[in-house]
Amino acid sequence: MDKKSIGIFGGTFDPIHFGHCRAALEIKQQLKLEELRLIPCKNPPHRTTIASAEDRLAMLKLAVKNTPLMIDDCEMLRSGPSYTVDTLLSLRKAHPRTSLCLIIAMDAFLGLPTWYEWEKLIELANIAVIDRQGWNMPGSGILAEFFNNHALASKENIIDFTCGKIVLQSITSLDISASNIRLLIQKGHSPQFLLPDSVLEYIQKHTLYSPP
Ligand code: ATP
């Protein structure tokens, strides 16, 4: 039988950390999503990555082991820029009647109008925006209008819609970022307790993020 609801949480995960894992788990629980897929971005259109796509995927596999989170490596299998709209198109084709929910943290959501074919995203999936300290939904302008046109008041009902709705979700705020973790390693400091030990062991074994 087809899945009832799938959450999609994309990122560079360079490296994955507890901020990502906790956000994904809380959103899965709060929105009652049947599956939560972490989707590592192979070729991000707007930035570069430090670790290779293979290393970032390997770290993700270690992080989700024995957890309710899953990985979808569909972007790893495509060439060219990893556009979210292409990922949603392929997911929608595979799951025509499933409630799809694209999870985007507020900092990323504020840049949504710069994403390739961004207006198509809401025709393919719902969107859950993660509220993050220091980042606010604009009161006016194109994004405020976009949000108001699609906002769903009763958040827990989002899985009743296949696409077209936006909810704003609060989660436990963890002030962790991949860039800070990379900086700590560069300085010779330990990032332990900011990310799973298995991921840290992988970073150490493969001397990722260390100065040359
Ligand atoms: P970097 O510091 O390299 O920019 P990052 O830690 O923000 O990386 P990404 O892989 O770029 O990680 O993020 C993927 C998604 O996870 C984005 O939507 C980002 O906003 C969100 N995110 C990152 N860190 C957190 C956190 N601590 N809590 C909630 N969401 C987060």
Image: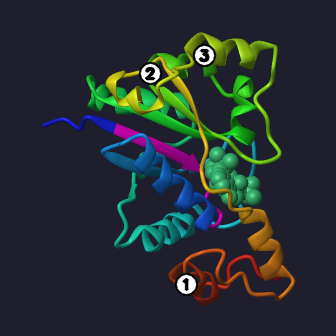
In primary-sequence order, the first of circles 2 and 1 is 2
- Residue at 31% x, 26% y is 93
Distance between the alpha carbons at the discs numbered 2 and 1: 36 Å
Q: Nearer the viewer, residue 169 or 77?
A: 169
For the magenta stretch, what is the residue range? 6-17
Decide: few, some or many residues near mark 1? Use Cα within 10 Å; few <14, some 14-19, many ≥20: some
The spot of residue 80 in percent (x, y) is: 58, 39
Residue type, numbered disc 2: Leu
Determine whether, in the image, residue 139 is placed left or right of residue 65: right
Report if residue 170 is visible in the image.
yes
The spot of residue 73 in percent (x, y) is: 42, 52
Does 63 appear above or below 190?
above
Distance between the alpha carbons at the discs numbered 1 and 3: 39 Å
Residue farthest to the left? 1
Q: Nearer the viewer, residue 32 or 115?
A: 32
Locate residue 147: give its quadrant.
Answer: top right
Find disc 3 in the rendering and name its residue. Answer: 119
Q: Secondary structure at mark 2?
A: helix
Locate residue 30: give its quadrant.
Answer: top left
Decide: few, some or many residues near mark 2? Use Cα within 10 Å; few <14, some 14-19, many ≥20: many
In primary-sequence order, the first of circles 3 and 2 is 3
Does 148 appear above or below 83?
above
Label 1 or label 3, whichever lies nearer to me, is 1
Find disc 1 in the rendering and name its residue. Answer: 197
Q: Which mark is residue 52?
A: none
Decide: few, some or many residues near mark 3? Use Cα within 10 Å; few <14, some 14-19, many ≥20: few
Locate residue 70: give its quadrant.
Answer: bottom left
Determine whether, in the image, residue 69 is placed left or right of residue 109: left
Find disc 2 in the rendering and name its residue. Answer: 124
Q: Secondary structure at mark 1?
A: helix
Mark 2 and mark 1 residues within 8 Å of each other at the beta carbon: no
Residue type, numbered disc 3: Glu
